[in-house]
Image: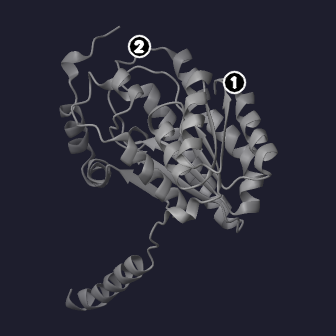
């Protein structure tokens, strides 16, 4: 045992030293002049990311369903100092929109540096009622459109050695009651993009993939869908948006935000899954959930 400790301790120390001294600090200048697509950008985290990027001097192309909201976001981005700001409106239920947005970026800028996938389809936090059609539609919006947009954007991202940022959820790592349909789509994102990252590395393609594992964030959508269920306090969407941008710019593998409320459950999951299930259930207002 003593010999094992003598070997392990120096190795752990070396690992920690390399980790901390190799960490690159984020600088807003990293995004100046960068060409960025942000989906789901008419409100919530996506809207706040657009504003942060505008202040950093990036070119932004935002997309969402509601044109009037996108027009306001673009106007605000230009006031904040964006190098340029444009929008494409439409629903990601239509797979053709994913390709159309990427084509617009190519026409506007001739290339792309960062693709931020952030949109979600409407769902409910309730007992699963057997609605398979709802799951199918949600998979098209929350998963397949992410894949379609990535496929369209990869040629330009390869040229720029760019980044893909995927906004996911703790519900894509841990099964959350009353969110079976939503959780399924987020687990799918984790599986696809984690596998794709490996393939890009094998092929020596310098395109980074950052998975953003988010907890409870104070957005309009989350408040509408899940505020009656979740007991945990919600983190600010403005701060969350900035952390996502930082993680993408630094080409991190994963972002856990808020850190403690996401990272600790993930650590417990591997060692005491039943205990984690119990903690998860106890953090929900089950009495507020009605069977449909």
Dividing the picture into quarters, in which one does residue 285 lie? top left
Which residue corresponds to the image point at 72% horizontal and 36% vertical from the top-left?
101
Residue of label 1: 94
Q: Is residue 40 visible?
A: no
**Residue 102 image offset from top left, x and y in percent:** 74, 41
**Residue 292 image offset from top left, x and y in percent:** 35, 7
**Residue 50 image offset from top left, x and y in percent:** 54, 43
Tell me the colour scheme of the image: one colour
Label 2 sits on a secondary structure element that is: loop
Quarter of the image where the N terminus is located: bottom left
Which residue corresponds to the image point at 64% horizontal and 57% vertical from the top-left?
34
* Dot 1 crowding, Cα within 10 Å, few <14, some 14–19, many 20+: few
Q: CA distance from mark 2 to mark 1?
A: 25 Å
Image height of 20 relative to 165, above or below: below
Q: Nearer the viewer, mark 2 or mark 1?
A: 1
User: Of residues 35 and 186, which is closer to you in this image?
Assistant: 35
Sequence-wise first label, 2 or 1: 1
Label 1 sits on a secondary structure element that is: loop
Residue of label 2: 129
* Dot 2 crowding, Cα within 10 Å, few <14, some 14–19, many 20+: few
Image height of 46 relative to 180, above or below: below
- Judged left or right of residue 3, residue 173 is right
Which residue corresponds to the image point at 34% horizontal and 18% vertical from the top-left?
127
């Amino acid at each position: 045992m003593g010999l094992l400790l003598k070997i392990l301790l120096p190795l752990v120390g070396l690992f920690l030293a390399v980790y901390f001294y190799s960490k690159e600090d984020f600088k807003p200048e990293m995004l100046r002049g960068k060409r960025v697509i942000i989906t789901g950008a008419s409100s919530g985290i996506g809207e706040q990311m657009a504003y942060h990027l505008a202040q950093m001097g990036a070119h932004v192309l935002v997309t969402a369903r509601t044109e009037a909201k996108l027009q306001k976001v673009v106007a605000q981005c230009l006031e904040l100092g964006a190098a340029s700001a444009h929008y494409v409106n439409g629903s990601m239920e239509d797979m053709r929109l994913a390709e159309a947005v990427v084509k617009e970026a190519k026409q506007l800028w001739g290339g792309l540096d960062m693709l931020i996938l952030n949109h979600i389809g409407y769902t409910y936090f309730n007992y699963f009622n057997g609605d398979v059609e709802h799951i199918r539609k949600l998979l098209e919006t929350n998963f397949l459109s992410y894949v379609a947009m990535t496929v369209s954007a990869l040629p330009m991202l390869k040229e720029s050695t760019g980044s893909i940022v995927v906004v996911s959820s703790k519900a894509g790592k841990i099964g959350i009651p009353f969110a079976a349909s939503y959780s399924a789509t987020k687990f799918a994102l984790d599986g696809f993009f984690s596998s794709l990252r490996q393939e890009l590395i094998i092929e020596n393609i310098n395109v980074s993939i950052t998975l953003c594992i988010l907890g409870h964030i104070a957005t309009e959508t989350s408040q509408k869908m899940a505020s009656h269920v979740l007991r945990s306090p919600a983190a600010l969407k403005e701060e969350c948006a900035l952390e996502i941008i930082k993680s993408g710019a630094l080409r991190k593998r994963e972002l856990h935000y808020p850190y403690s409320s996401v990272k600790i459950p993930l650590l417990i999951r591997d060692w005491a899954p039943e205990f984690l299930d119990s903690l998860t259930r106890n953090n929900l207002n089950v009495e507020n959930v009605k069977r449909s």
